[in-house]
């Protein structure tokens, strides 16, 4: 049916202004909550100034690893798995410059291997068993974890050290149990999971920047 026009005597209802104070009483608190995310992010980002030497040291480690023909292995759970894949993508693809691909592998991306190990052994072993099979002296194993206490991440770093690989921990707060097996610590200056993940992205971009410049030279 076609829309029928209003008759000359019809009077449209007066709209309620979007800014009416009683329209959405929760809007003010929601805005404050979102603003707190911005403030928390800025505070964590400012705290990164003290971590610049540690970030640069990891970038130099990756450059040395690739120079001598080593491989970087990355891993993590959930959002941290996405961060691990992000770093791998930047290194195999490129960050900003056209240059050669760099050998990097994310240990979360083979669903068959992951589910095989989890089913036949335990989920705690899904990374450590791959590390024992693949990582060698001269390689780097980089783990992303917001808590630092994920058993499969801790086990992977321990296995990496046993195999002679150098370990890097992208963590937050005090780093948790994983710090015991980390040669390089990149701990986001926050104890909040969202802020830690945001700073991990900043860190991996900073590392990618320096590695990119080197690989494109």
Image (cartoon, rainbow, N blue to C red):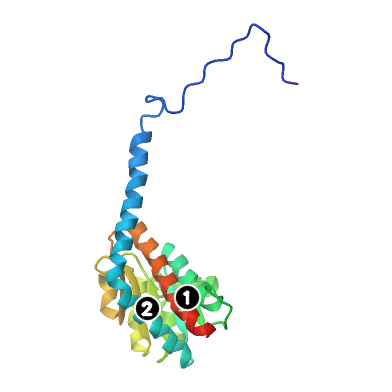
Query: Where is mark 2, residue-wise?
Result: 156
Q: How many marks?
A: 2
Q: Residue 56: x, y in percent? A: 36, 79
Judge left or right: residue 85 versus residue 32: right
Q: Which mark is residue 29?
A: none
- Are the residues flagged by discs 1 and 2 in contact, CB closer than 8 Å? yes
Q: Residue 72: x, y in percent? A: 45, 82
Judge left or right: residue 112 versus residue 84: right
Q: Nearer the viewer, residue 173 or 75?
A: 173
- Secondary structure under badge 2? helix
Q: Earlier in the sequence, mark 1 or mark 2?
A: 1
Judge left or right: residue 95 versus residue 42: right
Q: Residue at x 36, y 68 (%)?
A: 145
Corner quadrant of residue 13: top right
Where, quadrant-wise, is the N terminus in this rendering? top right
Q: Residue 28: x, y in percent? A: 35, 35
- Callout 1: 10 Å neighbours few (<14), some, many (20+)? many
Query: Where is mark 1, residue-wise?
Result: 107
Q: Residue at x 34, y 64 (%)?
A: 146
- Callout 2: 10 Å neighbours few (<14), some, many (20+)? many
**Residue 166 against residue 110 in the figure, above or below:** below
Q: Residue at x 52, y 86 (%)?
A: 217
- Secondary structure under badge 1? loop
């Amino acid at each position: 049916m076609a829309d029928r026009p209003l008759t000359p005597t019809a009077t449209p209802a007066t709209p309620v202004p979007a800014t009416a104070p009683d329209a959405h009483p929760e809007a003010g608190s929601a805005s404050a909550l979102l603003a707190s995310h911005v403030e928390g992010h800025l505070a964590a980002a400012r705290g990164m100034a003290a971590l610049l030497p540690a970030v640069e040291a990891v970038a130099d480690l990756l450059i040395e690893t690739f120079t001598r023909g080593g491989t970087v292995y990355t891993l993590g759970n959930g959002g941290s798995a996405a961060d691990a894949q992000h770093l791998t993508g930047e290194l195999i693809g490129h960050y900003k410059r056209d240059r050669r691909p760099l050998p990097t592998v994310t240990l979360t991306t083979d669903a068959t291997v992951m589910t095989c190990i989890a089913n036949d052994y335990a989920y705690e072993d899904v990374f450590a068993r791959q590390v024992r099979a693949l990582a060698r002296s001269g390689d780097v194993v980089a783990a992303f974890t917001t808590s630092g206490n994920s058993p499969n991440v801790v086990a992977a770093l321990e296995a990496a050290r046993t195999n002679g690989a150098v370990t890097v921990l992208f963590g937050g707060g005090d780093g948790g149990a994983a710090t015991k097996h980390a040669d390089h610590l990149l701990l986001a200056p926050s104890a909040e999971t969202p802020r830690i993940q945001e700073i991990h992205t900043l860190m991996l971009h900073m590392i990618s920047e320096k590695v990119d410049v080197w690989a494109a030279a």
